[in-house]
Image: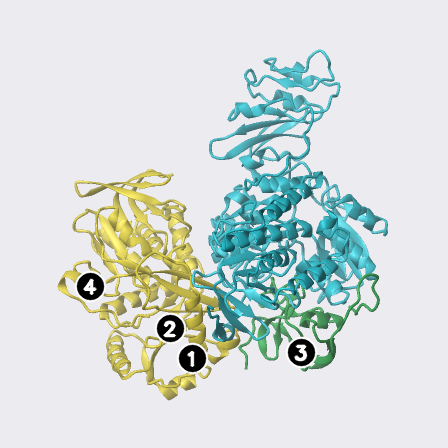
Chain colours: A green, B cyan, C yellow
Amino acid sequence: MERIVEHPLLKFERGEKIVFYFEDVQMQAYEGETIAAALHANGVRMLRITPKGSRPQGLFCAIGKCSSCLMEVDGKANVRTCITPVKEGMRVRTQKGRGEKSE
Amino acid sequence: MNNPDLLVLGGGPAGLCGAIEAAREGLRVLVVDEGISPGGQLVKQTHKFFGNENFYASTRGMEIAGKLLKELSLYPQVILACESSVLAVYPDGVPVLDRRSDSTYLYNPTRLLVATGASEKFLQFDNNDLPGVYGAGAVQTLMNQFGILPGKSVLMIGSGNIGLIVSYQLDQAGVEVKAILEASSRIGGYRVHADKVKRLGIPVLLNHTILKAIGEKSVNGALITALDERWRPVPGTEREMVIDTVCIAVGLTPSAELVAQAGGQLKYIPELGGYVPLHDSDMRTTIDRVFVAGDVSGIEEATTAMIEGRIAGLNIVKDIKGKCNETRLEELKETLSAFRSGPTSSKIRSGLEKMDLVTQPARYVEGEVNRSGEFRGKLRPIIECFEAIPCNPCETSCPVGAITVGENINDVPVIDYSRCTGCGVCATKCPGLAIFMYQEREDGMALVGIPYEFLPVPEKGQSVYATGRSGEVLCTARVDRVTRSANKTNIVYLTVPEELGRDVRHIHVTNREESSLICRCEEITVEQVKKAIREGYVDFEELRRYLRVSMGPCGGRTCRLNTLMILSGETGVPVEKLSPGTLRPPAIPVSFGAIERNAKVTHE
Amino acid sequence: MKNKACVTIIGGGVVGSATAYYLAKNGLTDVVLLERDYLSSGSTGRCGGGIRQQWSERMNVRLAMRSVEHFKNFEREVGLNIEYFQGGYLLLAYTEEEEALFKKNVAMQQEEGLDVVLLSREETVRKFPFMNLEGLKLSAYCPSDGHANPHLTTFGYARAAEKMGVNVLTHTDAKRVLVENGKIRTVVTDRGEIETGIVVNAAGGYSHQAGEMVGLNLPTESYRHQIFVTEPLEHILDPLVISFVNNFYIRQTGSGNFIMGQGDRDELPGLEITPTWKFLKEMSDKMPRFFPFLKDVRILRHWAGLYNMSPDAQPIIDRSNEIEDFYFAIGFSGHGFMLAPAVGEALAEWIVFGEPRSVDISNLSLQRFERGFTREKNVV
C-alpha cells in the first residue's frame, strides 16, 4: 500500500500536501484524493465493521455504488469515503455498526 | 444555471461524446458526473484502443478522455458538474445532488441522455467482503487514477478482457500478479490480451476458482481449487496462496436504475450484462425524452460507447431543432455496425437482436442444410453437423428412415422432418454429440434435449445451470425428464425460454459456499436466501421485504442480480421471467440538508 | 388452481391475509385469497407501519386496543417475528384547539383503560431531548402504542393461513364477479374462474373498483400518500411521533431506518403512485426543524401508496344489503395496517358465526353515512 513513484505510462500530478486524522493519528494526503485512497496510501484497508456480523469491510467498488467504505467523517456517519475528497484537518474514524446521529 | 436543453448523466466516453454532438449544434448542455474528475472509466485505461483511427484507435484511454474534455471545453454553453449525482427522474423535475456543497438543484431539461455506465458483478465465496477484496474497477481507480497500489501481491479472478488488462496494468505498476483464475476451460478475453499477460509470466489457471479469502482484518491469503468440467471443486486440489489482494473481474452489469425508475422498460439480456434499457438504433429508450448510450445500454466497450453517444447526441439535436446532420448520423450507424460485425462481437450481436436491433449477420456457416423452423412446435432433432466428415449413425439408427446422409458418407445429414417422430434415437447415437432435441411450446418456453455423458445424471425436476456454446451460463433451467440410454449417452430435457433454446447446449451445477454473502449492506447470506425461498417467498419483492436483501444503501446494485439468479435456480423460473423488482428513487442516498439547500433553476 | 371455494377474498394485503387467517382459525379453510401482484404489494407494503390506539372516537379506540392484544401475541400465535415494538406514540399539540382536543380525547381514552398520559412541554423535552419542541403546548403519550413491519405481518398471516389449508394465489387478478339474483356465483380471474358464494372485498386502494364488480357504488376513493426511508442509524427514537398541524409522522424501524411521511392537501383522488420531488423537498425542509440530527442523515428510498378514504376517515366494515354475502373491509383512510388483526378477526367471526363476537364494529357500518357522522380528527 504505497504510492507509485515511477510508472511506465503514467505521471501523477498530485495536489497540495495536507494532513488528516484517522482514529486521532495524523496522516498525510494530497488534495484531490479521496478519503479511501488516502487511507490506502497510509496502509489502512479496514474502513468499517458491519452492524450485524461485525465483519470488517474495506474499499470494494470505489465509485460510490456499494456500502463497503462507509465511515465516520467529522462526526458524520455513513460517509462514502471512496467518492469523498479528503480535506485538511479532517477527522476520520472506522464506522462500527450503524452510524450514530451526528453531534 | 438555466434549464439545459440536454442533461447528460455521466461524463464517461458515451456521455462526453453525446454532449459534444449536442453542443456543436448550439444546445445548452449540462453534464453531471459522480466522480471527482470527469472521463469515467477512460481515465483509468492505460492500454491502446482497437478499432478505426477515426475513433481514437491506438490512443490510450486516458488520453482520449483528455481530448474529449478539451473539445467539450470549446463550447461555452456546456457545463460539466463533477461530484454530482442525478437522484431521480420525477414527473416534476430532475434533482441533482452536488456533493461538494451537499445541496441539490432541480432541472427540467428537454432531453436526458443516460450514460451512467456499469457496475461490477460480485462473486460469492467465503469472506468475500474482507478488506483487500476489490472489484477490478477499484483497483484501476486506486492504481491508475490516484497512483496508489492496492497491494503487493494479487490474485485475479476472471480472465475476460478486464481481468487480463488489469493484470497487465498491475504488473506495469510493479505489483506481482500471482495468478489469474478462470472457472471455465477457456480464456474469456481477446487472444491478444491473453498473450500479453502470458508473456509476462502470469499463469492463467483454467478450471480454477477461489473458495475463500483468508485473513482477520485484511486479506493475507486465498484458498483456491481446481474445478471439474461441471464447475465443481475437485477434492484434494485445494491449496492456499499467499497474496494480500484479491481482484474480482467477473464482468459488468448496466447501471440502468435511473432509466427504470423513470419508467423505461428493461429487459434481461445476459449477453449484454443483465437488465438493459430497451432502445432503438437511435438510442431512444421507451420513454420519449430519455436516451441511453454506452455500457448502460448494454456492456460493450469504450469505442462503441463513444459512437453510441454521438448517435444519441445527434438524435437529441434532431428532436429539439427538428433536424440534424443526417449524413453524419448514417455514417456513425454504419461505423457502429462495422465494429460489431466481427466474430468477437457475436455475443453482442445476439444480445442486440434480442431487443430487435438489426445487426450485420455473423459469418454464414456453411453446410447448414436443415430447415427445422418450418416444423415449429414439433419435437425434433436439431443437427449441428456442418462439417463434411465420414459418419452416418444418425442415418442408420433412425427407425423411420427420416435422415439421409446418402451415398457419400462424408456428406452432412439431411433430415425429412415430416417423417421424423421425435424419438431422439439419433441424438443418443451421434458420436459427435452434435444432435440436440428441440420443441417450442405454447407458453413461450422451449424443451431442449441435451446429449449428456457425465455423472451424476440430474433428476427430473432438479434445477441446473443451462450453458451456451462457450460454456457461458445462459439461465437456470428445470430438468423436464431424462431419457436414459444403454450406450450412456443420456438425453437431459430442459425447459428454457424459447429465445435461449437455440443457444443452450450444456448444463452444469455450481457449488457455491452457502455462508457467503449475497448482500453486503444487509449481510444476507446465500443460505438465508435459499431458506426463505423454501419457506415460500418465491417473488423477488417478497424476498426483498422478508430478508431486506437489496434494501441497503447500495440500492441493490451488488445483490439484485445474484438474488434473482438464486431465485431462478431454486424455482426453475428463468431469470428473464422473474420481475427484477421495483427501483426506487433516490438513486444515491441524499441528506435532508442537501435537499433543503436546493437552488431553483429558472427558465430563461 | 382451485376452481371452487366457500370464501374468496380479494386483496392480499394485511386485511385480506388477516381475514384468511382468522377464517381458517375458526375452522373455515375452504378459502381462496386473491392477490394480483405479490403479498403486501399495495397499501400495506407502502405504509408507515404505526400501531396506534389514540383515536378521537371511542369505538376506534376499542378496535385498536383489541388489535394491540393480537400484535403482542403475534409471534407466539401466528409464528413470525414481525419486529413489533411498543415504543409508544407521541402526539404533539401546537395550537389551543389541539390542546383542548387532546385533553378531551385522553380523558375518554383513559376511561377505556388505555395507558395514555398528557405530558407538559417540559416533560416532553426531558423525555425526548433530541427533538426541537419549540412552540409545543403539550403532548399525548401512549407507551403501549408502537409499530411493526407490515410486510412481515402480512407474510405471517398468509403463511399461517396456508398451513391451515387456505389457498393463497398471488399474481392472480380478480377481474369480474358474476352475480345472479343478488347472489354471488363466480369470481373470474385472469387465471381461471372460482365458483364461490361469499366474497370479501379487502382490495385496499382499489376497494371502489372491487365494489363495482358486483354493481355497488361504495363511498371510498383513493389518494396518493408519499413516504421515504433513511439510511439506518443506531436506535434513538422509541415512539412514532405525529404532529397534525405540522402534518408529519416519523418512526425508526427495527432495522434502524427512519421512515416518515406527510399528507398533501393538494392531492386529487386517483390511483397514481409516482413519487414526486415536491414531497421530497417539503419533507427535507420541514423534518430537520423538528429533528435537527436529521440534516446529515441520508434518504435511501422514496415511494408512494394509496390512502383509501371514506367520507369520515374511518373504516367501513360491513356486508352488503343488496348483494348477499358480499363483505367489505375498506376505506381504512391510512390506518388499515394497525386495525387489521381486530378487523380480520371480527369479519371472520361474522362469516363463520353470523355475527362479530370479539369486538363491536357496529359504528363502522355503511349505513352510518345516511344518518350523518363525525369525522375522525386524529389523521395525518
Same subunit: marks 3 and 4: no
Q: Tell me which chain the residue with mark 1 is part of.
A: C
- Tell me the mark number nearer the camera, choosing from 2 and 4: 2
Is disc 2 placed on a helix, strand or loop?
A: strand
Front-lying residue, B573 or B275: B275
- Residue at the spot 28% in from the left edge and 71% down from the top edge: C55
- Say whether disc 1 or disc 4 marks the residue closer to the N-terminus: 1
Q: Tell me which chain the residue with mark 4 is part of.
A: C
Cα gap from disc 1 to disc 4, whole angstroms: 36 Å
Amino acid type, callout 3: Lys
Does the residue at mark 2 contact the one at mark 1 (Cβ under 8 Å)? Answer: yes
Cα gap from disc 2 to disc 4, whole angstroms: 28 Å
- Disc 4 designates what residue? C363
- Residue at the spot 62% in from the left edge and 76% down from the top edge: A73
- Say whether disc 2 or disc 1 marks the residue closer to the N-terminus: 2
- Disc 1 designates what residue? C290
Label 3 crowd (10 A; few <14 / some 14-19 / many >=20): some
- Say whether disc 2 or disc 4 marks the residue closer to the N-terminus: 2
Same subunit: marks 2 and 1: yes
- Disc 3 designates what residue? A87
Cα gap from disc 1 to disc 3, whole angstroms: 31 Å
B210 sits left or right of B479 in the view: right
Q: Position of residue C245 (x, y in %)?
A: 32, 77
